[in-house]
Amino acid sequence: MKNLIKEKLAASGFELIEDNRNRYVKNLNMLLDSGLFKLTICEKGMSWVRDDSKPTNTRSNRYNVIIRGGGYIKKVFVDSIDKVSLLQQFGWFLKDEKVRENIKASVTIPTNCAKCQGIGIIPAFHYYCSGICFDCCGTGFDFKTKTSIELLNK
């Protein structure tokens, strides 16, 4: 699997030393690789005044992050750009039932997620982002199956 999160961070001036063996990095890469989400990180030391504007210099210690998926957009300021804070933002984004329903509607081959057994949450991890299963984006469907079948048909 390509390390998409590392490329995104490098393009914005941040460094990520971990590879896909790290669970946080692997989950972020699976979310981005699914094609259902887009992540935009403002360049280091810059900030957006509006979405359509160019970044401007800022003195703030917070960073702009925009997550798009399921027909929704989440704009946040985070204190640090790292694998944990980015995955938490995705988790909070996926807690919204409307976002998960729109993502479910885009899945063409409904195969239950092996990690959460098709529930979309893992009760043992209720303390972290309400237990959202990052392997299936909280939908209960296995995206890896969908992607591999689509690749075979091309």
Image: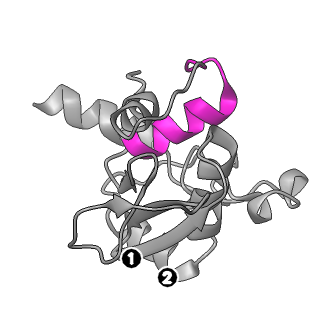
Work out whether 28 lies above or below 127: above
> Would residue 25 appear left or right of 36 to someone viewing this image?
right
- Mark 2 against mark 1, which lies toward the viewer? 1
Q: Position of residue 56 (x, y in %)?
A: 33, 62
Disc 1 marks which amino acid?
Answer: Tyr
On screen, residue 136 versus residue 38, left or right, reads right
4 to the left or right of 82? left
Residue 63 location, x and y as percent? 53, 58
Q: Residue furthest left?
A: 154
Name which residue type carries label 2.
Lys
User: Which residue is denoted by mark 1 in the rendering?
Assistant: 72
* Residue in the picture at 81% in, 57% down: 128
Task: Classify mark 2: residues with Cα within 10 Å, few (<14), some (14-19) or many (20+).
Answer: few
- Place of residue 93 in the rendered image (x, y in percent of width and height, measured from the top left): 56, 68
User: Residue 83 has which mark?
Assistant: none
Magenta region: 18-32
Q: Main secondary structure of the magenta part?
A: helix
- Residue 36, how many percent across, how many down? 35, 55
Residue beneath the point at 39% across and 32% down: 4
Secondary structure of the residue carrying tag 2 is helix
Q: Tag 1: Cα neighbours inside 10 Å, few (<14), some, or many (≥20)?
A: few
- In this figure, which residue is indicated by the disc labeled 2? 98
For the residues labelled 2 and 1, say whether their Cβ atoms are less than 8 Å apart: yes
Label located before the other in sequence (2 or 1): 1
Quarter holding the N terminus is top left
Residue 10 vertical placement versus 104 (above, below): above
Which quarter of the rendering shows the C terminus?
A: top left
Q: CA distance from mark 2 to mark 1?
A: 9 Å
